[in-house]
Image (cartoon, rainbow, N blue to C red):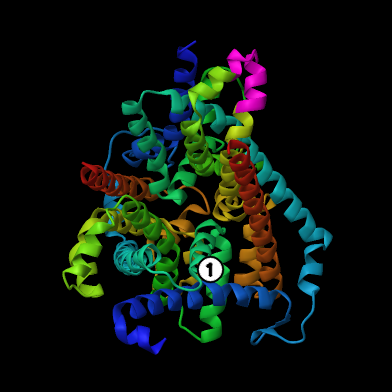
Amino acid sequence: MMQSIKQQPFRAAVLLLVWGWLLFLVLAPNLLVLGASVMTRNPGTFISLPLNLDAYRQLFNPLYLEVFLHSLYMATMTTLACLLIGYPFAWALSRVEKRRQMLLIFLLIVPFWTNSLVRTYALKLILATNGLLNSALMSLGVIDEPLQLLYTEGAVIVGLVYLLLPFMILPLYSVFEDLRQDVLLASHDLGAGRFATFKNVIVPLTLPGVLAGVMLVLLPAMGLFFVPDILGGSRNLLVGNVIKNQFLDARNWPFGAAASIVLTVTMALLMFAHRLSKRRLGEEGA
Amino acid sequence: MRWLPRSYLTLVYLLLYVPIIVLVVFSFNDSRTGYNWGGLSLRWYESLFNNHAMVQAMWNSLWLALTAATVSTMIGALTALALHRYRFRGKKVLNGMLFVVMMSPEIVLAISLLGLFLLLGLQLGYVSLLLAHVTFCLPFVVITVMARLAGFDERLPEAARDLGASDFTMTRTVLIPVIMPALMAGWLLGFTLSMDDVVVSSFVSGPSYEILPLRIYSMVRVGLKPEVNALGTLLLVFSLVMLMLSQWILSRSKQ
């Protein structure tokens, strides 16, 4: 070991820096959250012994359980909407001629580079009671009275879909790009109809993309607390809002940490499913 | 049937861009209520720049993004080089940690960092923001640089070593120039991520260092503020320039 440090001081310095940063700012904080979730709430030092599972039990308190389930429901709706919009979109995008494709992808990632708060606020301009959508519908005579669009569950879902759609489309686009036309032709030649080809060939081959997209959408859809803050009012909270309130306002670390562990475990399960689907594809392809 | 996918693509793009266009148009709207058109005006831009706290937050954000992008590019580049060139124990763990940072919900990263800083007794402000921003930018820089290194001729560094260059000299004279475009692209991405972040920043910032996204956040939570339209438009133009610059650098380097 000492020998290698003397021989390659640069290598040793690089590895030390990289490891140091990740251990200190990634591993240690995550272990801390894990630890905090099984400790007891303490007003002075935030957390203290003894160890217990009270925080996890508190998650099943009907009051919070309702918020969690509602958040999960909104996140699921968001993910489904992104999938329904994104799947045909990615398919169509992968069939556009190459030159134009680059421009279209560029247009897709512009929103990713622009401030998400500002874009959420822009939706507010459209959805407000006397906003653009209501004015447009009224002047067209579709409705007589402005609809209550803002501060509803629907507004939160629209906001989340608007922010997260590109994260569903990009992984889907990349699997559609890899989908070889000859495979589809082969399926057709073997006598499969359009629907059978879709069900037996296209869906299994694009499944890793679907799961990657779901992973990239579902979890942020439970965490982006500023979306309900701006569009949803106080009745449409996300898990993210609960974590934020518990950590920053109520100073209840164990509970906030336990909620965050639940999110992390969900993420781990989704990642596992993603790997599994990729591995299965690899085996079948080989 | 060719018109069907085309019109579908157009429709979705339209939906994605309508709110942005509305925002830009309304930023030039003279009306105070924010819904009706009251004629062309630059008054919201003017009131933006006359707002001292706002300008201060803007400078703070720019400085934070500048430093966070620079530090994360340096560490990210070294990480990518280490992952690419060195064999060492725990390489998979290192890769895994970067992957976890990229995939885990921002809010999880946010509370874990807040916990760390509070337990260490670190004053929340510029330093805590910097550490947090560098951490969430890092994986993006690493994958940008790794992608560049993947298509690289391995004989070049070997030749440099054979000619007697030390590891450090070889990295400086051979590898750095090769990954330069990726470094620039990674830097621009880091800068933008830092400028836009709300979730992590709202946990790890303190009253001593107010940054732009948090100021916007407190403005838009209640009602409509026409200044936000103007500010949003400026940020939009800014990110657009950054993105085009990064695409230009990457596409030029491919030739």
Disc 1 designates what residue?
A: B93
Between A166 and A68, the residue placed more toward the observer is: A166
Between A9 and B162, the residue placed more toward the observer is: B162
**In the displayed structure image, the side of residue B112 where residue A96 appears, left or right:** left
Between A286 and B105, the residue placed more toward the observer is: A286
Q: Position of residue B45 (x, y in %)?
A: 28, 49
Q: Quadrant of the C terminus of chain B?
A: top left
Vertical arrangement, residue B70 with respect to residue B150, above or below = below
Vertical arrangement, residue A20 with respect to residue A77, above or below = below
The magenta stretch is A187-201
Residue furthest to the front in view is B162
Vertical arrangement, residue B237 with respect to residue A185, above or below = below
Q: At x 57% / y 36%, what residue is drawn?
A: A129
**In the displayed structure image, the side of residue A241 where residue B230 appears, left or right:** left
**In the displayed structure image, the side of residue A247 where residue B135 appears, left or right:** left
| Chain containing mark 1 | B
Q: Tell me which secondary structure the magenta stretch mostly adopts.
A: helix
Amino acid on which disc 1 is placed: Val
Q: Position of residue B169 (x, y in %)?
A: 19, 72
Residue furthest to the bottom in view is A2
Magenta stretch encompasses residue A189: yes
Q: At x 22% / y 46%, what residue is drawn?
A: B253
Magenta stretch encompasses residue B167: no
| Number of marks present in the image shown | 1
Residue A252 in sight: no
Residue A32 in sight: yes
**Quadrant of the rendered image containing residue B156:** bottom left
